[in-house]
Amino acid sequence: MATEKKKVVVVGGGIAGSAIAYGLQNDADVTLVDPKDYFEVAYAQLRSCVEPTFAERSLILHADYLKKGKVLSASAVSATESELTTDTGEVLPFDFLVITTGTTFSGPKTKVERIKEFEANKKKIVDSESLLIIGGGPVGVELAGEICQDFPKKKVTLVHSGSRLIEFLGPKASEKAQKWLKNKGAEVILNDRVETEELTPPTYATKSGKVITANAHFVAIGKKLGSGWIEASPALKEKLNDEGRLQVGQTLQVAGLTNVFAAGDITDFKEIKQGFLAGKHAAAVVSNIKKLIKNPDEKKLNTYKPLEKPFGLVSLGRQDAVAQLPFATIGGWLPGKLKSKDLFVGQTRASLGLKQK
Ligand SMILES: Cc1cc2nc3c(=O)[nH]c(=O)nc-3n(C[C@H](O)[C@H](O)[C@H](O)COP(=O)(O)OP(=O)(O)OC[C@H]3O[C@@H](n4cnc5c(N)ncnc54)[C@H](O)[C@@H]3O)c2cc1C
């Protein structure tokens, strides 16, 4: 008689969650819980604002790569050490829980609606002579880059509250990104902010009293960490650090628990939060859960070593980028070759067993 497969519930269908669900689907009874019906390659969203058809490849239906697992379109609201509860009222028992809710979700729940959102963004860009972008993190800078590249006649103003752009990287990377944008004609205003509550084109007042004229705006402020539901879970709440990230050991198990794992941006590893690292966490989780399915007493689990030297890539239009490498920070076409043409979409699709399209 065949033994029943172990139940694995994966919460969050981003880079880490989709890879883990895909990697375990042949070995376990996998359920992926995500509020949307698609996985989005986060790095491609800004290209899709200027070229909505790009999203046909960068938005991947969960059902397309999870042929043997189940997909539940819902948000987790709480968990114990053996069950997960969702906002749709389902209670999912599990042998293993994997938490990958890096950032909170807000937005369209279907791929079709998300593409419509990109089409509306493109229309907004096309219909405007001037655009204001609020926020100079990776989303704001990459969006400004895409607009400056594809619509060189548009006047782009980027307002950022910090003293430099893309602060998650070092000052050299910030300088290179700012210089690139300036050379393309964009205006960058630092150390100032536009409150996002009442945004009324065509004039926007900054906190310092400047008045910016623009036909339309984009708010590019980072999303919140997806740990709200963990705070509502007594068994897990105490595992959050002060920032709201889950404390994990090198085996990716949540501190003090053997059957609960975490991966991606939600973990408390001291490293820059990056998708390629979320992918490495995911590989370790897949391997460790496979080992524990075979032998619950397995002690030789794979370990993950956090990245010590910061590494990051920010695209600047279709050809250029700025890269902070362990030994140097470089800008221009060379780092652009790594990221800016396909934005890792082909690579991500291949990792999920999908054709390029
Ligand atoms: C503009 C931009 C450019 C970037 N460029 C790069 C790059 O070049 N290279 C790189 O390595 N990294 C890059 N990153 C960082 C990278 O995108 C993140 O590190 C990565 O997406 C983290 O993956 P994750 O799986 O941990 O979380 P996320 O991708 O944030 O996924 C979280 C998932 O959890 C789901 N979720 C949230 N709450 C709940 C809930 N309560 N219940 C169920 N599901 C929930 C969400 O719907 C989502 O699917 C970039 C990020 C941005 C914004």
Image (cartoon, grey):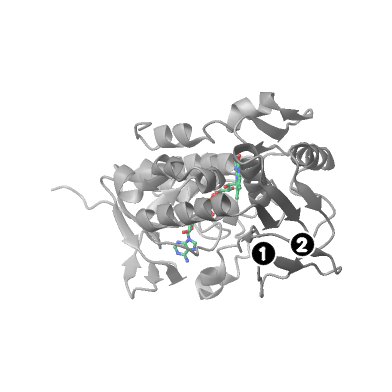
SS at mark 1? loop
Q: What residue type is labelled 1?
A: Asn
Would residue 27 appear left or right of 10 to someone viewing this image? left
Tell me which label, 2 or 1, sits earlier in the chain. 2
Q: Quadrant of residue 72?
A: bottom left
| Neighbour tally class for label 2: few under 14, some 14-19, many 20 plus, Cα within 10 Å | some
Instruction: Say which of 31 and 204 sits in front.
Output: 204
Is ligand 1 within 8 Å of the beta carbon of the residue shown at mark 1?
no
Residue to which mark 1 is pinned: 241
Question: In this rendering, does residue 292 appear at all?
Answer: no
Local secondary structure at mark 2 = strand
Q: Residue at x 50, y 41 (%)?
A: 284
Q: Which of 214 and 247 is in front in this view?
A: 214
User: Does residue 183 appear left or right of residue 221 in this picture?
Assistant: right
The amino acid marked with disc number 2 is Ile
Position of residue 226 relative to residue 139, above or below, is below
What x and y, as percent, mark residue 192? 82, 62
Query: Along the line of sight, which residue is nearer the eye, 310 or 6?
Result: 310
Q: Distance between the residues labelled 2 and 1?
A: 39 Å
Q: Which of 143 and 10 is in front in this view?
A: 143
Residue shown at 41%/52% (left/top)? 115
Q: In which quarter of the image is residue 176?
A: top right
On the question of residue 49 being in view, the answer is yes
Residue 138 place in picture, x, y as percent? 67, 48
Quadrant of the image occupied by residue 201 = bottom right
Q: Mark 2 points at which residue?
A: 212
Residue 259 spot, x, y in % from top left: 45, 57
Label 1 Cα neighbours within 10 Å, binned few <14 / some 14-19 / many ≥20: few
